[in-house]
Image: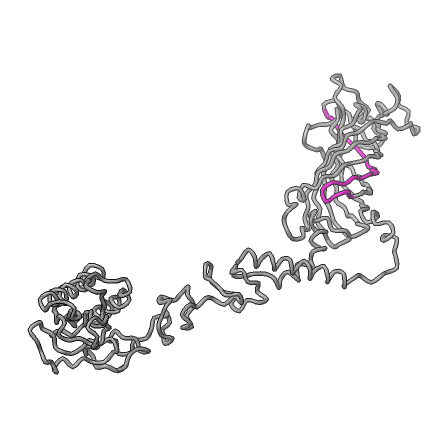
Amino acid sequence: MKIKSKIINCSLALVFATGMTTAQEEPKEEKTLMAKYPKIENLYFGAGLGTNLGFTDIKQYAYWPVTKFVNEYSMGGHGFWGYQFTNIFSLEGSLFFGGIKGVDREKGLWFEGNLTELGIDAKINFTNIAFSTSGGNRNFSLYGMAGMGFNWHKSVLRKLGAGDDNDEIVRVEGYESSTNTDNPDASVAGVLNLGIGASYKLSKSFDIFVQSSIRLMDTDKLDSWISDNGTLDKYNYNSVGVIYRLGNKSWEKPEDDFIDKLSKLDSIMDGFKDADGDGVMDLNDQDNLTPEGAMVYGNGAPVDTDGDGIADHIDKERLSICTQVDADGVALDSDNDGVVDCKDAEPNSEQDCQVDVRGKCIETNASIGDKDGASGVTSGLPSVFFQLNASNIDYRNYPTLTQVAQYLKSNPKVNLVLVGHTDVSGTDNYNNALGKKRAQSVANHLIKIYGIDKSRITVSTKGASEPLAKANTARVNRRVDFLVGE
């Protein structure tokens, strides 16, 4: 039933959602430039400012900058423009300007120069790779970049003196051996750019970033010094800056666009949810807190087989014969006499009073007595009937025997005398024996099947001496009656 209900619910949701999206068409608006050319929204621009540190042949320490006499740090700045193809990949073109310096006290030399660089870089967003399926907006992103370009540089190599422009010029880049400083042509070299950075979203349009890159140059002349081992020069550029995004497009995760399109359907589907998993959608469920495994009706209400107001999954007596029950669904027995209130003729019986199946007290002191120990008072229990000339118990008598067993277990101080009867179709001796055999058959059933103590049962016979019907072979004469024992 649950599977069918869910299929119907989903079908209704899709039909309803289709009608809603058709009816709620967006109003027509005047087309803007971005509406006419939607790809423009992927464009962005930025600028940064930072420091350069050269790693050339003219350097005092391999990995540590010198700041005394000659400061090896130089300023630099760059501008860039980019196009974002996906939430992970984008391309950028950049233009860089900056200075470069270096000093080597052992050689007694230092240099300074200017850099201009034009390049193109591919940028990969590591954060969106790692969290491409997660929800929510991420303001922080970590990215890597790689690219290439061309570098125009001019540099002057000087002897180390006071550390200013008055130091003797050893060489000017662009001339093999010259001290000419009359604006020589800049040298051109290829450059490979590798970098890493992090950005933070300030708003839909603006980001700030910090990044570091190493520029590997295809030349050994950045410092106007050519080494013997042919090691190529390189420099490090660290910067901070700002990015402006033209279209304000969110690239948080690939499924964002799909989720936006389904937002209306999601709101509709809320009404078709099944919070308690009972197969009935919440919209029509009269009980949204049905526990797992509980059977329910079509309206979601838990099944109550006996109609006593207690759901089957907590009802300890699912087939109560009364509607007056306790919190566990067990029929009430106000006087604790073993007979439920709805069947009790005396619902206020005195304590320790022995009762019959109707709940009435048994007057044992009114005994008329007989040799088999019967008080002469009927127990109120129904008789068990037999086929002609038979003593075996017919299955149709099982409900009666169950009632007798319940009565004995509810009244542990009561003993019963089982009196067997026959019709008049046989001799007296035969009938007396058959009556006792029938009573013994009933006693054996109560003892073996229901575990009744045999000391509480006495077997007796009346043969054909006490018929109920006038007809000699009437079935009601072939019976076993239950009398209260002394």
The outermost residue toward the left is: 371
Pick whichever, 350 or 399, lies toward us. 399
Q: Quadrant of the C terminus?
A: bottom left
Spot occupied by residue 441 in the image (x, y as percentages of width and height): 18, 62
State the residue at coordinates (83%, 27%).
189
The outermost residue toward the right is: 182
Spot occupied by residue 239 in the image (x, y as percentages of width and height): 75, 41
Spot occupied by residue 129 in the image (x, y as percentages of width and height): 66, 42
State whether residue 95 is above or below residue 433: above
Residues rendered magenta in the picture: 84-105
Spot occupied by residue 236 in the image (x, y as percentages of width and height): 74, 34
State whether residue 461 is above or below residue 190: below
Tell me: 98 left or right of 272. Answer: right
Would residue 199 be seen by someone viewing this image from the given angle?
yes
Pick whichever, 3 or 167, lies toward us. 3
* Residue 142 located within the stretch drawn in magenta: no
